[in-house]
Amino acid sequence: MFPFFSRSKMSDAPEVNPAPAKTHEPHPLDALTGGAFSAATSGERASRIRDWLATQPAPEQLQEVFKELSGRDKGAARAVRERLDEIRRAKGQEAIAAEWADKAQALLAAPKLNIADALAWQRDAAKAGAPLSREPLSQLKVQLADRVKVIEDLQHRVQVQREAAVLLAQRIEVLSTKPWRDAHTALELLRADVARWQEQAQELTGDASWASVEARFPPLLDASRTQLLVVWEAFQPAVAQAAAAAEDVSAPLPPVPVWADELRAARGLPTEAAAAAAASAAASKPARVAKPKVAPEVIEKAHQLVRDALATLEKETAEGHGKASAGAAAALRAVLKVHGKHIDNALEQQVHTALVAAGELEGWQRWSADQVREDLVAKAEALLNRPEGQALGGRKMQETLRNLRDQWKQADQGGAPNHALWKKFDEACNAAHKVVEAWLDKIRTEAAEHKAQRLALIEEVKAWAQEHAASGDWKAINRSLYQFGDRWREGGHVGEKIFAELQPLWKQAIALAAAPLEAAQKESLARRHAMIDEATALGAAPALRIDAVKALQQRWQAEAQTVPLDRKHEQKLWDAFRKPIDEAFNRKSADRDRAVTELSARDRVVLDASKALEAANATGDAQQIRAAMQALEAALRGQAQAAEAVATANKDAQSHAEAQANAAPAAAEIGAEASAEAAEGGDTAAAAPAPTPVAPKPVARPVVAVRGDDRPGMKKDAPVAPGRGARPGDRRDGRPGDRDGARGPRSDGRMGDRADRGGRFGDRPAFEDRGPRLGDTAFRAQREAMEHAQLALKKLAAQAHGEALTQLLTAWEKRDAALVPGTQDLGSGVTASVRSAWTQALSAAPKGDAAEALLRLEMAAEAPTPAEHIAARRMLQLQLLTRRNDPAPTQTWGQDVARVLASNSDAANARRLQNVLKTLLRK
C-alpha cells in the first residue's frame, strides 16, 4: 500500500512547514513583529507581517526579520523582501536623481542652451530610471521645458518676421507697378509697417535667450532686414521725386518706368517706348545716335539667369517640396537683386507670381507637417490609455514606438520642425517606453534562467553518456537521445550571443552520447546492404524460393528491431530490400494470372451484350435500353449457349427422347424450357417431344487443391447432387427437409416433421444451374452497364413524369380534355377511372371552389401550405378528426384533383397543384 500523505519532490506546491510545537520560550522577534513568529498558521503569520510593515520599520529591522523568516515561511517573507527591494530601489533612484539634477542645473546655468540637449536630458533620465515625477527633477524638468519653449517661440517669431519682410517687399514692388499717386497715398502706412517690423526684429535680437537660438535663424533675420531696407530706401526717394516732378515740370523724372511714363503723359511728352519707336523708325540718319544703356549680352545673361532660377522654383513648387522651394525662392531673390533691373515686365510678373506661390506652399507645408505631428502626438499619448484588456505587450509597444519615431522623422523632412510638439511627443513616447523596459527586464531574466537550464541539460547529457556507455539497448538509447533533443529545443529563448556560446557545448555533449549508437548504426547499415544484395539475387533467380525469402525477411525484421535508424533512411532501405522480392512475386502472379486472363466463350458473349447495353444507354431510348438489358440478362443466364446447343442437338433429338423422358424432374424441366425456346425460334420440330439440349462441355480448370472429406459429391467417384454448385455460401438442392441430397428425410427429432407440413422451404422450386462463373472483366463490364442502364431509365422516367405533369397543367389552363396524358404516362398511381374523372372535369364548364381540395391534396402529399392558407388547413384538419368514417386525403386524392381541375385555373393554384402532383404521381 502506498501512503496517501507521500508527496512528490518535484511538486510545484509551495512548501509550507507545519506549525511548530508550542514552546514556552517566545521568539526574540515576536515583540518586534507583533507575534508573527509564534503564529499558528501561515495566513495569520502573513497578516501580522503586513500589519508590522504598515508601521514603517527601519531597514535594519527588515533585514533581520527577513533573514529569520525566509527559512520558516517563504510566503510571509515575500512581503518583507518586496519592502527591502523598494528601499533599495529608492536609494538607487535618489542617487540617480541627484546625478541628473546636477546635469539639468548645468544646462540651465549655461548661457547658450541647446534644445536637443534639453530634450535628450529628459529622455536619457527616463531611460536611466530617474524619478522625474519627484522633486527636484520635476521642477527642473518644468524649467527646461519653459526654456525650450521660449527658444522655440523666438525661432518661430524669426520665421514670422522673415515672412513679414517678404510681404512688405512684395507690397512695395506691386506699388511700383501702379500709378505714383497710389504709392504716395500708401507711403505713410508702409512707413509705419516698416518701423514696426524693425522694432519687432530689435526685440528678438535683444531677448536674453537669443544666444540659444539655432545658428541658422540669426542670418535669416539679418538677410530679411537688409533686403527690406534696401527696397524701402529705394522706394522713398522715388516717391518723393515723383511728387516733385508732378509739381515742377522742370524737375527730373523718377527712376520707376511706370511713374516716369505717367508724368511724361501728364506733361504732353511721348512715352519712353514711343520715343524709342520713333527713333528706330527714323531712316534719315545713317547710324544710331543713342546707344543702349546696357550691352545686349548683359541683358541676355540676366534673362537667362532669372529664367533658370525661376524654372527651379516652379519645379520645386509643383512637386510640393517645402524646403527645396524655400531655398529656390531665396536663390531667385538673390538673382533679382543683381539682375532684376535688366529683365522685362513679363518676366518680372512671372517671377512675382512664382514667389507668391512658393510662399503659399511653404505655409501649407508647415501647416500640413504640424497636422501630421499632432496626429503622431495623439497616437503616442493613446498608447498608455488603451481600454482594459487591450494593452500592448512589450514587443508590440517597441515596434509601435519605433514606427512613430520614424514617421516623425519623415514629417521633419517635409517641413520646418516644431519643437513644442516634439517635446509632447517625446514625453509620451518615453512614458510608453517604460512598458518596453519592463518587458526587456523580463526577457533578460528569462534568458538567464533558460541559460542555466540549458547548461544543466548539457551536464545531464554528459553524465548520461558516461552511465550508458556500455549499454546495448540501442532503441532505449535512441529514445533518450530524442528526448534530450526535444528538451534542448524546448529550453526557452536565449539571445543569439548566448546561443552561439551554448550550441558548441551542446553539440559536443550530444555527439559524445550518440557515438556508440552511431557506430552500431554503421555496422547495421553494412548488414542491411548485404541483405539487400541477397534479396536482389533471390529475386533474379528463375525459381523463387519462398523459404529463403521468409528467412531473409525475418533477419531484416530482427535487425530493424535491434538497431533503430532514421525513419526516412530506414524506409528507403526497406523499399530497396522489398523491391526485387516484390518484382519476383509480381512476375509469378503475372504468370499465374496469364492463364486466367483468357476470356471464355460465355465471357465474350457477356462483354458483347454489355457493350450493346452501353450503346443503347447513349441513345436515350427506353425501349432499346430495356431490350439490351434483357439481352444481357439472357447472356448471363447462359441462354445464348443453350440456343447453340439446341441447334447442334437437333440431329439426334429422336434418339435421346426416351432417355430424357426417364431423366430427373429437374432435367425434364430444363428440356421443356429449351424446347419452348426452340419453338419460338421457328424450329420445325416444335410438335415433337421436347428434346433436351446438351450443355457444352465446360473448360477444364487446373486442380489447385483437393479437400479430403467424405461428403456427398466431394469424392471423385461419387456423383454430385443436382442443383447449384458447391461453392462456399451456395445452397444445395434436394428434397424438402434434406440438407445434402444424399440422406433421407428425418423421421424424428427437432426438425423431423418439417417436410410433412410444408415448411418454409418445402414448396420452393429447385435452383437453376447458372453455369460457370464469370471472369472479372466480364463481371465488371456487365455490372457497370446495368448500373448505367438503371440510371438512364430513372432519368427518362423522371423526364416523362415532368412532361406528363406539364401537359396536365396545360390541359387545365386551356380546358382541353384532349391534352390530358394517357394512363401509362401518368404512372401506376392513376387508374383509368381517375383519368376519366379528370377528363370529364375538364370537359365541363368551370365550377366550384378548389380551396378545400387543394388543402386535402397538400395533406395527402405532406407538402407545405402557403402562409395565407395555414389557418384554413388547421381548421380542415380539425374537421377531419371529427369525420371518423370518411376516407383519408391519401385515399381520395384522385377525386380531389378532379375537383381542382373542375374549377377555374390561376397561377397560384396551378403552382400548388404542381407541387402536390410531383409527389402523388410517384407513389
Image (spheres, rainbow, N blue to C red):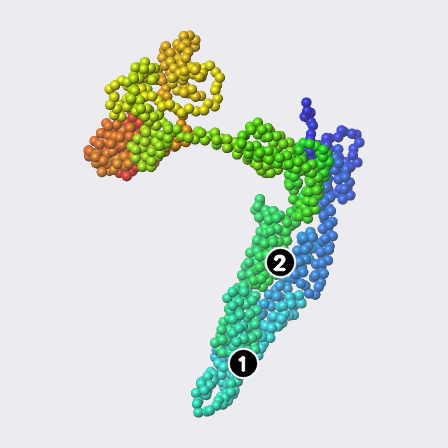
Where residue 887 sits in the image (x, y, percent)?
A: 29, 24
Q: Earlier in the sequence, mark 2 or mark 1?
A: 1
Image quadrant holding the N terminus, namely top right
Residue located beneath label 2 in the image: 423
Q: Is residue 893 visible?
A: no
Q: Secondary structure at mark 2?
A: helix
Using the image, determine if residue 262 lies above or below residue 139. Answer: below
**Residue at left 46%, top 88%?**
279
Residue located beneath label 1 in the image: 298
Using the image, determine if residue 508 lies above or below residue 293. Answer: above
**Residue at left 48%, top 20%?**
706
Using the image, determine if residue 303 lies above or below residue 719. Answer: below
* Label 2, residues with CA under 10 Å away: few <14, some 14-19, many ≥20: some
**Residue at left 44%, top 92%?**
284
Amino acid type, label 1: Val
Where residue 71 sits in the image (x, y, percent)?
A: 75, 36
Q: Nearer the viewer, residue 875 or 801?
A: 801
Where residue 115 sits in the image (x, y, percent)?
A: 65, 62
Q: What is the count of numbered marks? A: 2
Residue 457 as seen in the image, left or right of residue 860: right
Residue 836 as seen in the image, left or right of residue 284: left
Q: Nearer the viewer, residue 740 or 212?
A: 740
Image quadrant holding the C terminus, namely top left
* Label 1, residues with CA under 10 Å away: few <14, some 14-19, many ≥20: few
| Alpha carbon separation for disc pair 2 and 1 | 52 Å
Q: Secondary structure at mark 1?
A: helix
Amino acid type, label 2: Lys
Where residue 741 sits in the image (x, y, percent)?
A: 40, 14
